[in-house]
Image: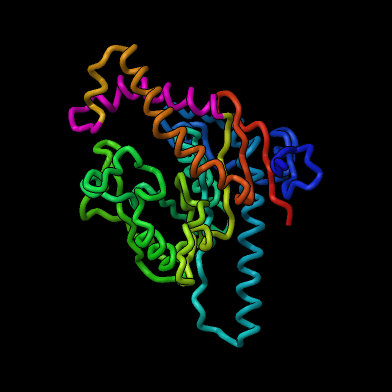
Amino acid sequence: MDQLAPTEKYSPYRFFSAAEWAQFRADTPLTLSNDEVVRLSSFNEPIDLEEVRRIYLSLSRLLSAHVEASQLLFRQRQVFFNAHDTVKTPFIIGMGGSVAVGKSTTARILKELLSRWPSSPKVDLVTTDGFLYPNEILRRENLMERKGFPESYDVGALLRFLSGIKSGQRNVQAPVYSHLTYDVVDGEFITIDQPDILIFEGLNVLQPRELPRDGKIVPFVSDFFDFSIYVDADEAQIRQWYVSRFMRLRETAFRNPASFFHRYSQLSDDAAQAIAEGLWHNINLKNLHENILPTRPRANLILRKGANHLVEEVALRKL
C-alpha cells in the first residue's frame, strides 16, 4: 500500500495542489522583498516571490498555528503542575530530503518568514553538516564515500545538541562545516541561545536509529521535533539538479585552489559530467534509496517539487 498516493483511501495524508494550498495563506502578509528572496536562494535553486506567495505563506501560517498550540499546551501544563519557573522549550522544526532537492533554500525562506511574525520570535537555523565526523576520522574508518550516510555523523553530538536546546539551556554550541574545504572547521562553533523556533535541516534527520539489543533507551533525532517537513521530487529530477549544480560549481567555487573539489575544475566537460554522474549513482542515489526516502512517510508535511524547483503538491499529515 502506498500511503502517499492521493488516491489511497487509507493514506494518513491530505493532498493539495499548489493552487489549492496557496488559498490557505489567507491574509498572511508577504514580508520578503524580491532581492531578499534572491539572496536566500541556494546556488542552482531558483525561487521567486510568486513561489513564496503560493507555498511558503500558507506554510508559515500553518506553522504559526502549531507554535501557538504548543505554547498554549505549555501554559496549561504549568497550571496542571502548579509550576511557574519552568523554562519554555523551543519549537523545533526538522527538515529532511535528498541532496540537491532544495532543503537549504526552503529552510532559509522559512526562517525569514517565521522571524517576521508580529510577535517577532527568535528563529535559528542549524544544519546537520557540522555534526559529520571530520574527514580525518572518515578516512581512517573508510567512510569518505559514505559521507552523508547515517554512520558518517556523530550521533552522540547531535543528540546532546538537541537535548540541550529542548531543555532550554543557554548558549548551546553547534559545530561549523565548510563546503569549501568539505570538512568540519576545527574549533569553530555557532551558539544557539534559547530561540523560540529552531529549524534543524539535514539529509537524515527523520531516520530512526538502530535499536540496541540490551534494551537500553535510545532517543532518535526526530524525537526532538515538534513538526517535520520532507522536501521531495522525482528521482530523475533530483539527479538532473545535482549534476547541473556540480557542472556550474566547476565554473565558480571549484576554481578556488582552497576548494576540496578544485581538481574537478581542471577536467573537460565530458570528464566532469562522468564524475558527477558517478557521484550521484554511487553515493547520493544509494543514500536516497537506503536512508532518506524511507523516512518520507514520517514527516508531518511533504513538499513535492516539479521542474524549476516549483512545488506542485503538498501532503499534510492528518491530525
Question: Which residues make up the magenta segment?
Answer: 235-260
Task: Left or right? Give the position of 241 relative to 174.
Answer: right
- Which of the 4 image quarters holds residue 212? bottom left
Residue sitting at 23 percent across and 26 percent down? 262
Instruction: Name the foreground residue: 150 vs 234.
Output: 150
Q: Is residue 25 above or below residue 208?
A: above
Q: Is residue 94 above or below residue 105?
A: below
The quarter of the picture where the C terminus appears is bottom right
Q: Residue furthest left?
A: 257
Task: Left or right? Give the position of 145 relative to 33.
Answer: left
Instruction: Name the foreground residue: 217 vs 29.
Output: 217
Residue 257: % across, % down: 18, 28
Q: Is 245 colored magenta in this rendering?
A: yes
Residue 208: % across, % down: 51, 56
Task: Left or right? Give the position of 266 relative to 112.
Answer: left
Secondary structure mostly taken by the magenta-highlighted segment of the chain: helix
Do we see residue 188 in this rendering?
A: yes
Residue 185: % across, % down: 24, 48
Residue 180: % across, % down: 27, 36
